[in-house]
Amino acid sequence: MNYKIALIRGDGIGPEQADATIQVLSTLKDVLGLDFELIEAEAGDKCKEERGTPLPDETIETLRRSHACLKGPVGETAADVIVRLRQMFDLYANVRPARSLPNTPSLKPNIDLVIVRENTEGLYKGYEYELNGVAIALRVITRRGCERIARYAFDLARRRRRKVVAVHKANVMRVTCGLFAKTCREISRDYPEVSYSEMYVDAMAMNLIRNPEKFDVIVTTNMFGDILSDEAAQLVGGLGLAPAANIGENYAIFEPVHGCAPDIAGKGIANPISMILSAAMMFEWLGTRHGDEKCLLASKLLNEAIAKTLEEGRVLTPDLGGRSTTREFGSKIATVLRQIRSRN
């Protein structure tokens, strides 16, 4: 199958990360014979400056004609790009893994958790207004939204260590968080083989630091998930290493968690790992969706190549204590990828 992958380079360090990622993916294509093409599309701050809109209609059409999208970070127009795309394609599941990697500043060496965040509802839906000096935000939580994000989390846990924790604040937000908690409990009965528990969001913020290795799949609402996933990323080395997926029933967008880092843009020192790991998530999703073992192997090889490169520690970007450029780091990962494949 020929996969059409929409590629949005983004702003700031995004284009540099994209170049390194393309280098690695070209090697992957060569060693596996994986049939895919990258179709570039524009979005973000630079796009707005040049074209008057951060998300042109042509970009939306490119995504509609593709099987998935790999997206770099964008700047101040992020809400006009990714938030709009989440709503437009109904990408209800934001999936953010946090896993300890070799030679990175992880809090503990055995962290391996995933935060599954509802991606289309809650306070981030943007229903806000101000009247007579009073600002009001509406928090929209639906049973349908709770059901499908809970099922996504439990289905994921089945393939992992079979533990789900639902995070909420139902002792205060009795109606909205109450509906989320109640729905998660009901869905849990359909998965007797998966251990289920609940935790208030403030307790989770504490326990992520105290015992991060105990968690497997954490499912929560939109804003709580946004905050907790950034915390989890810092536990395993920071946002520069953190990938993410925005997944719907028929489409998905994969992107680094971090922003566009304009302070280091153009210096050639950005770490491309977050975007390469996002590509690994993309191939895993494509492989699972289409029953394609070659895509699943591609995901596995990308993860192995990154882990091996970090373990060797000879070619690293400055954020990891090295002196290599973004391009050199990408080239090293590509070389290691080829070596791993030649031994298998």
Image (tube, helix red, strand yellow):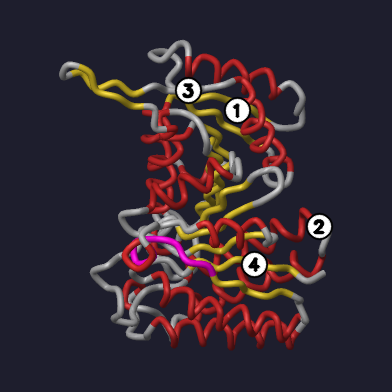
Q: CA distance from mark 1 to mark 2?
A: 25 Å
Q: For the residue carrying disc 4, how many other residues have a C-alpha within 10 Å: few (<14), some (14-19), or many (20+)?
A: many
Q: Position of residue 212 (x, y in %)?
A: 47, 44
Residue pointed to by mark 3: 140
First in sequence, mark 2 or 4: give its number. 4
Q: CA distance from mark 4 to mark 3?
A: 32 Å
Label ID, residue 290 = 2
Q: Quadrant of residue 300?
A: bottom right
Q: Is residue 184 magenta?
A: no
**Residue at the image point whose x is 63% and y is 83% from the top:** 26
Q: Position of residue 82 (x, y in %)?
A: 47, 50
Q: CA distance from mark 1 to mark 3?
A: 10 Å
Q: CA distance from mark 3 to mark 2?
A: 33 Å
Q: CA distance from mark 1 to mark 4?
A: 27 Å
**Residue at the image point whose x is 45% and y is 16% from the top:** 170
**Residue type indicated by callout 3:** Val
Q: For the residue carrying disc 2, how many other residues have a C-alpha within 10 Å: few (<14), some (14-19), or many (20+)?
A: few
**Residue at the image point whose x is 61% and y is 72% from the top:** 39
The magenta segment: 41-47
Residue pointed to by mark 4: 5
First in sequence, mark 3 or 2: give its number. 3
**Residue type indicated by callout 1:** Gly
What secondary structure is marked by label 1? helix
- Say which of marks 1 and 4 sits in front: 4
Q: Are marks 4 and 3 in contact (CB under 8 Å)?
A: no
Q: Nearer the viewer, residue 33 or 236?
A: 33
First in sequence, mark 1 or 4: give its number. 4
Q: Is residue 46 magenta?
A: yes
What secondary structure is marked by label 4? strand
